[in-house]
Image (tube, coloured by chain):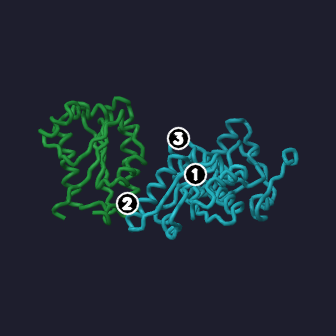
Chain colours: A green, B cyan
Amino acid sequence: MSDFNPNIRAFCCHYTSQQASSDHGEGLKQAGFPGNVVLDRLTCTGKLQVSTLLAAFEQGADAVYVVGCPPDGCHNVKGSQRAAKRVGAVKKALAELAVEPERVRMYHLERGLHPEFVAAAREMDTMTRALGPCPFNGESR
Amino acid sequence: MIIAERKPVAEILDMVRDAKKILVLGCRGCVTVCSAGGEREVEILASLIRLGRKKEGNPVEVAGATLVRQCDKEYINSMDQWEGQYDAVVSMACGVGVNFIANLRSSTRVFPAVNTSFFGGSVVQGEWTEQCAGCGDCILHLTGGLCPVARCAKSLLNGPCGGSQDGKCEINPQVACVWQLIHDRLESLDSKEQMLRVAPIRDWRPAGHGGPRKVVRNDLTV
């Protein structure tokens, strides 16, 4: 278990992640962003579908999280609130399949590269390492 | 429209536990509108079945598709394109769709993915309430357009039961007493004397108590 390097997918709002990815991730790396977290930039997290989050698990993710704007500060008004609802739906679906619902999570953060953005990734990384490989990937690890 | 809700994934996985190739088949009718079984929900269920089976160490091939409707023979006929390709069809249509596939495709194993709930409408986004019981002998002209068969817990036809409090049903205090609503509406329409009418003993056969119902429109049959 000690050599377990979790596969983590992060779906981020364009505004939340624009600075984070503007220098090809160099700034992120220097700030301590875990190398095993793969960022997916979205026009708005409100565009995110439940099926996209589930597909990330199908593709082998051990954990998936979404970073959108603060609920009352979304550039597209309710985009990050919609995303939070969809993350809630995936949590429910994981629970139905007897998989830890905490493997999917929603963060509401201010736009840009803040310590909180890096902290969220590190939190997911630490939590996923503690949980171990996702049961969907159990056989293949 | 017909309102439905997806069954728990574990129940669906149990139905198709022996299947190797599954077609999740949605319907672009009512279940799309109530977000239970349209294209988007097909994608989600297909993914959940794959994940559930992967977790069991018994991976499965799952494809998704939708029909315009599953309550018409001509659309069921379009299933011929998948003939022999799947050993189970999981229908996300209402129960009518499941019945139609079972009626018309003798060798197709078909399973229901949703619980068909009621005839209802959307009061606000994401919330549906029962409005009609499909009971076949409509009396809405006598009740101000509000249905006591569907919306009274006791389906009373001659006024309230006497158990409601503050306009709420004694069976479920979250629900308005429909007879209170009927009274208030008839009063506002200056027609409350309709409340004095005594409903004759009802023939419940058209409500389904006479077995499966049938409508034939001779002007439409060819």
Q: Nearer the viewer, residue B32 or B58?
A: B58
Find residue B127 and report its horizontal and vertical position in percent.
Answer: 52, 46
Pick whichever, B113 or B180, lies toward us.
B113
Sort mark 1 into few (<14), some (14-19) or many (20+) by Cα contacts within 10 Å: many
Q: How far is disc 3 from disc 2 in space, using C-alphas?
A: 27 Å
Packing grade of label 2 (10 A; few <14, some 14-19, many >=20) is few
User: Which residue bears the numbered disc 3?
Assistant: B124
Circles 3 and 1, Cβ within 8 Å, touching? The answer is: no
Residue B220 percent across, percent down from the top left:
84, 45
**Label 3's element?**
strand
Measured along the vertical axis of the image, is residue B184 above or below residue A132? above
What is the chain letter for disc 2? Answer: A
Q: Which residue is mark 1?
A: B26
Disc 1 residue type (three-letter): Gly
Which amino acid, by three-letter code, is at mark 2? Ala
Q: Quadrant of residue A70?
A: top left
Front-most of residues B133 and B102: B102
Labelled disc at residue A95? 2
